[in-house]
Image (cartoon, helix red, strand yellow):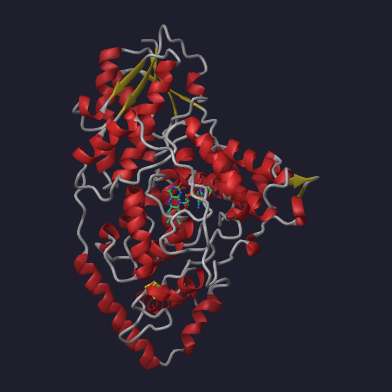
């Protein structure tokens, strides 16, 4: 073998620069399924199945192009790690060099080149063409900035890429339409929602589903409803389906939650994009075309562009800028273990139960569920950042560390001390009451921090304000929220402290470390 082209599970990009000068007569693609990647965090069955099915379909597409693929299927080898599997194949195939794009996870970006060095083979990295901005672009933009605010990065990249710009100005005269993107479904609810395109299960997917059910039987979740775009063609279909049926209302209901409705007007494209079956440029261009043709309003299209060209590129930049130290961030000194309910979904809190069950069963929750339900609960409770990070990395079909870690540690847990967001996303149960219909069907009352119907979010919210008062009371953006503490009578605050401490103790007692590799 001349070039051995390494393709990882989140690099399934047929247009990748690693294939530019691929010579089927002399080169081979190397792909490997390794159990450790599913067990180092206790992945849901849906997440494991997502990666394995997409990899196998990609392998088949490469074979159909006439490529030689050295594919290590999970059940056909017993290497403990990706590094071991690669080392063994370097010895067997003796390539002149290894070609790859930079792995999406810091750990593998260090260890795989190391394996090659140890084998005396060159590791050659090609630029990752999937993204709009490189980590170097981001580092350049970030130079000299103490705070890395999305808004400024987004404006910079929109100008550079000439997206939604009109003669140097943002179209519609505004950079963002956030204020139009916060509607709820009111009392009537969302009505009939457009069901997302279904793809069904072909023989390749069936084999993986059976394999995951057998080999990872102990892992959380189920695969009965497993239905995701798993090839580039299916990802394109899923994009079209979103543009035609859900984009027009995407912006308006971006922040809304409704019990038993996991998809609402969301695109469900994150996994396809993160595995690189779908290019973000293609997704953005399709939304822009819909706007130009009058098929979607500006607030929906700008909202969608902001998520992809803005947030998605921004978190990747932050990840590479901050790793590996990012993993140790814990600015708020959070020290609670992750309660068992995150792994079981068993709780009387209606909002948490809905978000957790759908997360475990489907490998999906939309952004506001992740940020303002599960994330908020962990923030208020004070869960150790490393534990909540490991949970988020394990449960979602779209979970890849470069996008998961900044969202969890930076955005939702404020563990980075405010480098990403100007103040913690702290709220009481009343926020969830406003954005959803959950509280009406819950034994707790979101207005009550105390008493038999006290909402755990609300108790923990006041306790959170109290515990972090010294830090935020005079904070320019958060101070006003914190000064609400002054409205509480001292005896009431004492009672809240006691109740929060009891809640924290009770939840800590439930914590079990899920079985995972050491
Ligand atoms: P839509 O709501 O339809 O949004 C469109 C696209 O925008 C998404 O597909 C995604 O690619 C992008 N996007 C939206 N918000 C973000 C964001 N904050 N950061 C990066 N991209 C964004 N996203 C992941 O892809 N993987 C993760 O592991 C992940 N973990 C998260 C953890 C927490 C605590 C939070 C608050 C957010 C996380 N997100 C993650 C971001 C976001 O929640 C998901 O991208 C989104 O819910 C995926 O569903 P969708 O494709 O239907 O998105
Ligand atoms: Fe969630 Fe509290 Fe509302 Fe129950 S009352 S659904 S726990 S916010």
Residue 149 spot, x, y in % from top left: 58, 56
**On the rendered structure, is 67 left or right of 237?**
left
Residue 391 spot, x, y in % from top left: 32, 53
The residue that appears at 23% across and 68% down in the rendered structure is 508
Can the viewer see residue 6 in this picture? no
Most distant residue in the front direction: 192
The residue that appears at 61% across and 60% down in the rendered structure is 252
Residue 302 spot, x, y in % from top left: 65, 51
- 198 over 187 or under it: above or below: above
Location of the N terminus by quadrant is: top left
**345 or 499: nearer the eye?**
345
Answer with the quarter of the image where residue 108 lies.
Answer: top left
The residue that appears at 20% across and 66% down in the rendered structure is 510
Answer with the quarter of the image where residue 347 lies.
Answer: bottom left
Can the viewer see residue 336 in this picture? yes
Most distant residue in the top direction: 25
Location of the C terminus by quadrant is: top left
**385 or 144: nearer the eye?**
385
Residue 381 spot, x, y in % from top left: 34, 69
Q: How many marks?
A: 0
- 23 over 185 or under it: above or below: above
- 374 over 480 or under it: above or below: above
**329 or 86: nearer the eye?**
86
């Amino acid at each position: 073998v001349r070039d051995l082209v390494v393709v990882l599970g989140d690099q399934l990009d047929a247009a990748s620069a690693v294939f530019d000068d691929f010579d089927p007569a002399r080169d081979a693609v190397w792909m490997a399924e390794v159990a450790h990647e599913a067990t180092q965090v206790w992945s849901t069955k849906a997440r494991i199945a997502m990666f394995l099915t997409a990899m196998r379909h990609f392998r088949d597409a490469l074979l159909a192009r006439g490529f030689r693929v050295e594919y290590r299927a999970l059940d056909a080898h017993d290497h403990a790690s990706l590094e071991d599997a690669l080392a063994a194949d370097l010895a067997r195939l003796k390539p002149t060099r290894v070609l790859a794009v930079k792995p999406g996870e810091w750990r593998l970006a260090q260890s795989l080149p190391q394996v090659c060095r140890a084998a005396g083979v060159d590791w050659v990295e090609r630029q990752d063409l999937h993204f709009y901005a490189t980590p170097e672009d981001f580092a350049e933009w970030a130079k000299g900035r103490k705070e890395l605010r999305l808004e400024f990065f987004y404006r910079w990249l929109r100008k550079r890429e000439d997206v939604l710009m009109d003669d140097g100005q943002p179209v519609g005269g505004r950079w963002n339409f956030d204020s139009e993107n916060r509607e709820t479904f009111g009392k009537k609810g969302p009505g009939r929602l457009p069901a997302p395109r279904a793809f069904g299960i072909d023989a390749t997917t069936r084999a993986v589903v059976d394999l995951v059910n057998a080999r990872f039987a102990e892992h959380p979740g189920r695969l009965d409803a497993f239905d995701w775009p798993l090839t580039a063609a299916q990802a394109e279909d899923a994009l079209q389906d979103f543009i035609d049926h859900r984009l027009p209302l995407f912006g308006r209901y971006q922040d809304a939650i409704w019990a038993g409705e996991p998809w609402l007007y969301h695109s469900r494209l994150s996994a396809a994009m993160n595995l690189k079956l779908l290019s973000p440029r293609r997704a953005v261009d399709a939304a822009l075309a819909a706007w130009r043709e009058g098929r979607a309003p500006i607030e929906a299209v700008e909202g969608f562009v902001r998520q992809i060209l803005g947030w998605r590129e921004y978190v990747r930049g932050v990840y590479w800028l901050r790793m590996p130290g990012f993993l140790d961030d814990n600015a708020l000194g959070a020290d609670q273990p992750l309660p068992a309910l995150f792994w079981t979904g068993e709780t009387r809190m209606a909002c948490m139960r809905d978000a957790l069950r759908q997360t475990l069963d489907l490998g999906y929750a939309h952004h506001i569920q992740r940020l303002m339900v599960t994330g908020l609960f962990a923030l208020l409770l004070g869960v150790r950042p490393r534990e909540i990070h490991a949970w988020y990395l394990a449960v979602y079909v779209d979970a890849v560390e470069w996008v998961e870690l900044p969202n969890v540690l930076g955005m939702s847990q404020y563990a980075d001390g405010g480098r990403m967001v100007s103040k913690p996303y702290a709220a009481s149960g009343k926020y969830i009451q406003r954005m959803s219909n959950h509280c009406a069907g819950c034994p707790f009352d979101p207005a009550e921090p105390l008493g038999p119907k006290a909402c755990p979010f609300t108790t923990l919210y006041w306790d959170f304000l109290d515990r972090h008062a010294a830090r935020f009371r005079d904070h320019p953006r958060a101070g006003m929220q914190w000064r609400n503490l002054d409205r509480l009578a001292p005896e009431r605050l004492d009672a809240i402290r006691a109740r929060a401490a009891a809640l924290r103790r009770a939840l800590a007692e439930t914590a079990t470390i899920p079985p995972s590799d050491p």
